[in-house]
Amino acid sequence: MPVPEVADSFTGQINQITLGAAKAEGGSRTKTVTVGGAKNVVYGGSFDDAGEKPVIAMDVLDSKPHDWPGALAEQYKNVFDSPGDWAKKCVQEFGAELICLKFDGIHPDRQNRDAAHAVKVTEQVLRAVGVPLVLWGCGNDEKDNAVMPKVSGAAKGEKCLLGTIKQDNYKSLTAIALADGHFLIAEAPLDINIAKQINILASDMGFPLGRIVMFQATGALGYGVEYAYSIQERQRLAALTGDKMMAMPVICDVGYESWRAKEAKLADAPGWGPAENRGPMWEAATAVCLLQAGVDIIRMRHPKAVETVRKFISEIWS
Amino acid sequence: MALTGLEIFKLLPKTNCKKCGMPTCLAFAMQLAQKRAKLEDCPHVSQESKQKLAAAAAPPMRKVVFGRKDAQLTVGQETVMFRHEEKFYNPTVLAVTISDKLSGNDLNSRIKAVNSLQFERVGTKIGVRAIAVTNDSGSPEPFAQVCAQAAKQACPEPGRGGWSRERRANNSPADSSTSLGTSLALILVTESPQAAAAALKQIKDTAGTPLLAAATAKNAEEMAKVAKENGCPLVAKAESIEALADLSEKIKAAGVEDIVLNLSTGSLKEKLYNMTRMRVLSLKKVFRPLGYPTVSFVLGGSPEQQMAEACSLICKYSSIVVVETVEPYAILPMLTCVMNIFTDPQKPVQVEPKVYAIGEPGENSPLMFTTNFSLTYYTVESDVEASRVPSYILVVDTEGTSVLTAYSGDKLNEKTVADAMAKGNVASLVKHRKLIIPGYVAVMSGKLEEATNWEVMVGPRESAMLPKYLKEVWK
């Protein structure tokens, strides 16, 4: 039986960006990563509308974490004190396409490390791996403003993804990312209006829209994933219908959020199955859910979860 | 899809006879479109128009009900492509397979494993809702036998919370002790009309209304006959969207209206694209041959792969998902995915306002409050747990809003907090008189101290800082 035509085509599309600069472009990356470019909603239209395949950025922390659940810490305990080796392990053993260097250790309430430390770690990781880097501050505005510009400088010309800028704290990072040739992560707290506003603010400072990636905040499965899910769907639709201020690729933070979930971190929960399976499963499930709404870069932690998600991505974006 | 007033007007007699009580047929049509009038009020409308209007009024996706009388499952009747447009209505039914090649202890333990896949999250029971008996043997007798045994023994256990007994005793809602009192629905997976008929004969008194899967182009008439005789909904299984549309029409013509669609071939990628296209065709194009709920089978692969496939199919429009794994660590995320995606986006999920004990707090343990917006509460809960400092969390009823929203909406003030403290009888829980409040509402400290005579301690703004606060500031 002939069925009616479904011609849902859109005028807009998600920006396509390429992270990482090779030698010829003034950087030292041996690989670059291109994301974005979707011309339809997820699974909408034809296969060609899907854009570039989403990529996984594996987290490396600048300082040894003290609160990682056992099932996760087990994977990295030998490299916790050496971010360079940690990054290398993620790339060589687990196939990370990007490394997200997360500067938790500079937070005043954690180890309160200084800029010299952050710069050293950045240089170590740049030397250790050839994939592009995400450089992500600690979340304390004052400290990030003091340290992240130095980090940016240490990776100047590498076309890193630097973040995050927020509605009430965007100027110093935007200026330095512009000067050092990086891309920016614009963070909004599950609020689509604020998300747009930050892009406008950065753009008003002369920062190119084509170099912004949006972070809408992430909720883990069972802990608000549906909020992130719907915001991402709404953003994708806004972009497709022509809103240039919303046409950025999206990053989400699945690793941190899903390992906060009870279902992932509780060591002893006999009814839910063994912890070494449960945690990676929860992380992978969160990522898979968000992929259904449209996401371009996924921050993850456990190699087993990464493997599950990579397999799913390769089946869909083949 | 509902017709507009003008479209309805074209189907009316256009006599402006006023017998319906409206001045003109057009006015009547407008009222009809807004569902403020009934078609019966028009004495002159033609039989043909009546049928057209009734057909147009039917929802674009049919509702199908199956399962046992005490635990009926409703699938279909969805209205939107994206949950934020309205909401997804009937949560995906998760089913697990049982092969009719199993017998004896193997069969018993498989049924037991499926029965145990019941959980409790946020005070709500979630679980596997159906057993899909698969006719792997190829012959009717074992199929009928296994169906009969599954029908008899499929009685889920009460939900498992996962965390320690003390916690559950303290925190699980009052109704957790009541039995589920329900049994799992059956899905009969066979393409043999003989096997289907044999099984249905065996279980007709025990299994309520099973879902019969499936009719194909080859067996459609015979299967439809079995389904019709037994009053079962029937799955239509075909290899393409076009073939599926043909098949559903054929089954409908044979007298079965409760149909569930199954695309049987293609990679996961093709399935997800086709499921999306079918959803558009049924909802946006009101293409009736595809206006039915759907079922997907995720058979084979590791538990991880099954989880990933199942979650994508739950998000993308499968009304029923049948999996093979019985690993709780794979099933729980699937069920949580259903719960999250089918949450009403207009209604914030709330937790019960009361005092929650984290760990085993005593009379010297810290007491803090937060709001009853589930996201806020669970974030705080998770961070307090991480601190390993046994504590009491008092949940103030703010109608499901977060701390700042509740404060600016005057739902979080010294009075609501004092009320919650009185209701939770916190004075009897702790000896000290210190209350930790969220850093974002530090401004209410003064008034709160006046209203309660408790010492107010301003906690951190971000709950992630609670572990540090509880360890270092709280003494």
Image (tube, rainbow, N blue to C red):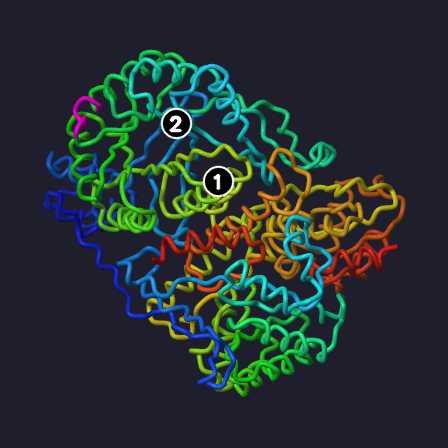
Residue A105: where, in percent of width, then height? 71, 68
Which residue in the protein does label 1 denote? B303
Question: Magenta segment range?
Answer: B218-223
Quarter holding residue A291:
bottom left
Residue B392: where, in percent of width, then height? 77, 45
In depth, the one of A148 and B57 nearer the eye is: A148
Nearer to us: label 1 or label 2? 1
Q: Residue at x 74, y 77 (%)?
A: A114
| Left/right of residue B460 with respect to residue A134 in the rendered view | right
Quarter holding residue B426:
top right
Which residue in the protein does label 2 denote? B132
In depth, the one of A273 and A2 nearer the eye is: A273
Q: How crowded is mark 2: few (under 14 residues within 10 Å), some or many (20 or more)?
A: many
Q: Residue at x 51, y 82 (%)?
A: A27
| Contact check, label 1 and label 2, Cβ < 8 Å | no
Q: Residue at x 65, y 49 (%)?
A: B377
| Residue type highlighted by circle 2 | Ala
Could you tell me if residue A201 is visible in this image? no
| Left/right of residue A57 with respect to residue A63 in the rendered view | left
Q: Which residue is drawn at 67% across and 37% down?
A: B163
Looking at the image, residue B206 lies above or below residue B90: above
Q: What element carries label 2?
A: strand
In depth, the one of B65 and A137 nearer the eye is: A137
Residue B220 included in the magenta stretch of the image: yes
Label the magenta part by its dominant secondary structure.
helix
Residue B39: where, in percent of width, then height? 21, 38
